[in-house]
Amino acid sequence: MGLHDQVMGGRSNGRAQLLSTHTDNLTHVQLSGQVSLDHGGGFASFRCRLSAPQPLSQAGSVILMLRGDGGSYKCCLHRRSETDGVQWQADVVAPPDWTTLALPLSRFVARRRGREMHEQPWQPDDVIHQIGIMAVRSEPGPFQLHLASIALA
């Protein structure tokens, strides 16, 4: 599901497309689009509701396998199933070559609509209902991110 800055009046857009790379035999999702700063915009996001909530009790990190345009992104975790609310975000830079990144849960900061929230930290009994990626830019322009996997570890 794509949720872009249009929810706040912005003009950014994006799409997700399933691709298969013949050179490395890797199926992945390509997230691409255009970030616009018009009308208070500046982000395009993609998220997925998990088929079953995932407990954090055994996890210490989020593992991403990705490549991209060298731009800034955020990995977003949602402890609730609604589409609006607090997201726990960690900054990611997407290098041009396939890379596996480990984002410790301690790097995730609670935010709602771009503002830092003073939520309590992760608790052992917390569960993740949704996970997503957000393209965030301070300058308008295109973005492209290829995502092969996201996992809790």
Image (spheres, rainbow, N blue to C red):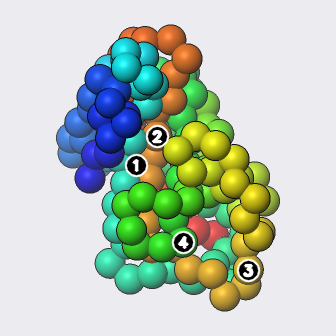
| Mark 3 or mark 4: whose residue is earlier in sequence | 4
Residue count near mark 3 (Cα–Cα under 10 Å), binned few <14, some 14–19, many ≥20: few
Determine whether the residue tagged by mark 1 lies in a helix, strand or loop: strand
- Give coordinates of residue 5: x percent, y percent: 37, 34
- Give coordinates of residue 152: x percent, y percent: 58, 68
User: What residue is shown with label 3?
Assistant: 123
Mark 4 vs mark 1, foreground winner is 4
Q: Nearer the viewer, residue 67 or 109?
A: 109
| Amino acid at dot 4 | Arg
Task: Tell me the residue at 46%/45% (across/down).
Answer: 133
Whether residue 19 is visible to the viewer of this picture, yes or no, is no
Whether residue 150 is visible to the viewer of this picture, yes or no, is yes
Residue count near mark 4 (Cα–Cα under 10 Å), binned few <14, some 14–19, many ≥20: some
Q: Is residue 142 left or right of residue 99?
A: left
| Mark 2 or mark 1: whose residue is earlier in sequence | 2
Determine whether the residue tagged by mark 2 lies in a helix, strand or loop: strand
User: What residue is shown with label 4?
Assistant: 79
| Amino acid at dot 1 | Ala
- Give coordinates of residue 60: x percent, y percent: 72, 69
Task: Tell me the residue at 62%/51% (across/down).
Answer: 111
Q: Are marks 2 and 1 in contact (CB under 8 Å)?
A: no
| Amino acid at dot 2 | Met
| Amino acid at dot 3 | Gln
